[in-house]
Amino acid sequence: MGARVRLPLVPLGDLLTPLLAAGLACWLFARGLRRARARRFPRDAGWDRAALFGLGLLAGLSGLLVFHGPAEERASAHMLQHVLVGDAMPALLLVALRGSLAVHVVPRTVRRVLASRSVRALLRPWPSLAAWGALLWVWHVPAVYDAALASEWVHPLQHASFVLGGLLLWNQLVDPLRRGLLGLWGSLRYALAAMVVGQMLVALLVLSYRPLYAYGSTADQGLAGLIMALAQLSTLGTYALVRLRAHFREPLPLGRGHPLGV
């Protein structure tokens, strides 16, 4: 008989918290979807939104649970975990919630907090980008990164802050409440700025001549940088293509004053 392959066990505390959070998110989404459909908002409450929401939760849970063991041994696995938790999950969740559905899903208490003056200032485009970039870079300072690996409570805090940073960044790009603060070209410049901030960290990881963190090797660290680069190119690149495609598919205005207008 072949040797058995043992999967790394996830501690009960690390397993319970994300599952409870995912369960609460599913309940809030199902309740909001039902309310939106009852009020005749089928376009904003289709089953495609439920699929996107579920895919976002699946990405986050797989990052936290499936890669829990490998992330403690390899920088590349840890980076993949962070990409799923802090990039893929927030983007998919906010795409699923865009439009009137967000009002039905997000509890009223949370909406009041988001409407407060201090939080509204953070939810402006450039403060959100600055907060996202600061969280990204601070957690990759070697001493802070190694402290998160060694602590049972700092590591979950790191993951929670990546989720927060991802929500701040993608809230501006996806614009689920359709505030229109950036517009088409502003949103593309915003995505490019986020790309530059992320690729600076990628360059540091790839070009470093020695391991920056307590584990791994320069080769694995370079692989971690490559994973981050590909993740940013795929997410932000896809976003740019979708925005441009929607823009160029819009019909030309033929109203009064247009050369082709009648």
Image (cartoon, rainbow, N blue to C red):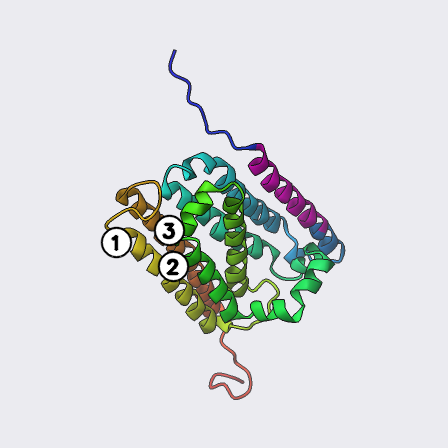
- Which is nearer the N-term, disc 3 or disc 2? 3
- Examine the rendered structure and indicate whether residue 19 appears above or below residue 98: above
> Residue 243, percent across and down?
47, 65
Residue under circle 2? 198
Q: Amino acid at mark 2?
A: Gly
Structural distance between the alpha carbons of marks 3 and 1: 15 Å
Residue 39, horizontal then vertical, whole percent: 75, 58
The segment highlighted magenta reads 12-31
Q: Residue at x 64, y 58 (%)?
A: 44
Residue 187 horizontal side relative to residue 23, left or right: left
Determine whether label 2 and label 1 are within 8 Å by CB: no
Q: Going by the picture, which residue comes out furthest to the top? A: 1
Please give the residue where the numbered disc 3 appears in the rendered image. 142
Which circle marks residue 207 in the picture? 1
Answer whether residue 7 is visible to the viewer in this image.
Answer: yes
Q: Which residue is farthest bottom?
A: 257
**Residue at x-position 69% and y-position 45%:** 27
Q: Position of residue 180 (x, y in %)?
A: 56, 72
Expressed as whole percent of the image width and height from the top left, the position of residue 66 reads: 48, 36
Three-letter residue code for mark 3: Pro
Secondary structure that dominates the magenta span? helix
Categorize mark 3 by other alpha carbons within 10 Å: few (<14), some (14-19), many (20+).
some
Q: Answer whether labels 3 and 2 touch (C-beta < 8 Å).
A: no
Q: Quadrant of the C terminus?
A: bottom right
Q: Residues within 10 Å of mark 2 (few under 14, many from 20)?
A: some
Query: Dot 3 lies on which element?
Result: helix
Q: Which circle, 3 or 2, is nearer the viewer?
A: 3
Residue 236, magenta (yes or no)? no
